Amino acid sequence: MRFAIARLSDEFTTGSSIMPQKRNPDAAELVRAKTGRIIGSLNALLVVMKGLPLAYAKDMQEDKEGAMDALAALSLSLAAMTGMIADLEPDLAQMKKAAGEGYATATDLADWLVRTLKIPFREAHHITGRIVAKAAETGTPLHRLPLSTMRDIEPRIAEDVFSVLSVDRSAKSRTSFGGTAPKNVRSQAKKWLRKLEKEKS
C-alpha cells in the first residue's frame, strides 16, 4: 500500500542502505518503539504497587528508575515529533485524491436518497450499493458517474444528487460539533493553539 501523502527532509530521515531513493522516517519509528519502553515502565510500576499495605513501604524505592526512564523517553519523543511535524511537507493533491478513493461519499448518497426521495435507509443502502458497484466496474468516482447510469438503478434521482457526492462537499456538510466542516476544524485548531500558547507561557 502506498500513500505518499507527505514528505520529510533529510533532517528527520535517513537513506536506505540498498535503495538510494528511499527515505526512512527514523524519528517516527524510534518514537513508536519508545511506547513499548514507557508501557513497560508502567507495567513494572503497577506490579510494584500491587498489594502494598496502606503506608510507605520500601518496595516503593523501585518506582523511581522506571518513572525517570519513562519521563526521559517521553521528553525525547515530544521533541522529536515536534520537529518532525514542523518539518513535514504535506502533498495536498495526493491527500485529496486519497480521500476520494474507496467511494467515501457513498453514505452521502444513501443519506440523500433518504432525505430527498423519502426512501427507507435499508432500501437506500441497497440502491447505493448497486450504484457504487456500477461505478467500480469502470473505475469512475461517484461524483463523475453519469446521471443516466444512476437513473437506470433509481429513476427518481435528480441532478441535485451531485451536490453531495464530492469529497469537498461531503466534508463541508458535517457542520455539527466535532464535524469535518472547514469552519469547525479552523475553530478547533485556533482553540487548541491558544491553549498551547497559554500552557507555554
Image: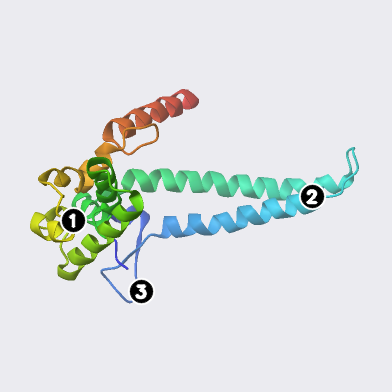
User: Pointers 1 and 3 in contact (CB under 8 A)?
Assistant: no
6 vs 71: above or below: below
The quarter of the picture where residue 43 lies is: bottom right
Q: In the image, is 65 to the left or to the right of 118?
A: right
SS at badge 1: loop
Do tag 2 and tag 3 residues touch (Cβ < 8 Å)? no
Location of mark 2 (residue): 62
Q: Is residue 37 left or right of residue 81?
A: right
- Of circles 2 and 3, which is in front? 2
Q: Residue at x 76, y 47 (%)?
A: 63
Q: Residue furthest bottom?
A: 18
Q: Name the image quarter holding residue 187.
A: top left
The residue located at (29%, 66%) in the rendering is: 2
Tell me the element at label 3.
loop
Q: Is residue 143 left or right of residue 105?
A: left
The residue that label 3 is drawn on is: 17
Instruction: Say few, some or many: other residues with alpha carbon within 10 Å of mark 2 (under 14 / 14 to 19 / 20 or more).
Output: few
Residue 4 seen in the figure: no
Tell me the distance, in whole angstroms, between the alpha carbons under discs 1 and 3: 56 Å
Mark positioned earlier in the residue sequence (2 or 1): 2
| 2 vs 1, front mark | 1
Kindly identify the amino acid type of the residue bearing the numbered disc 1.
Glu
Question: Residue 79 location, x and y as percent?
Answer: 46, 44
Nearer to me, 160 or 198: 160
Q: Are marks 2 and 1 in contact (CB under 8 Å)?
A: no
Applied colour scheme? rainbow
Q: Position of residue 25 (x, y in %)?
A: 38, 59
Residue that carries the numbered disc 1 in the rendered image: 154
Q: Position of residue 12 (x, y in %)?
A: 37, 54
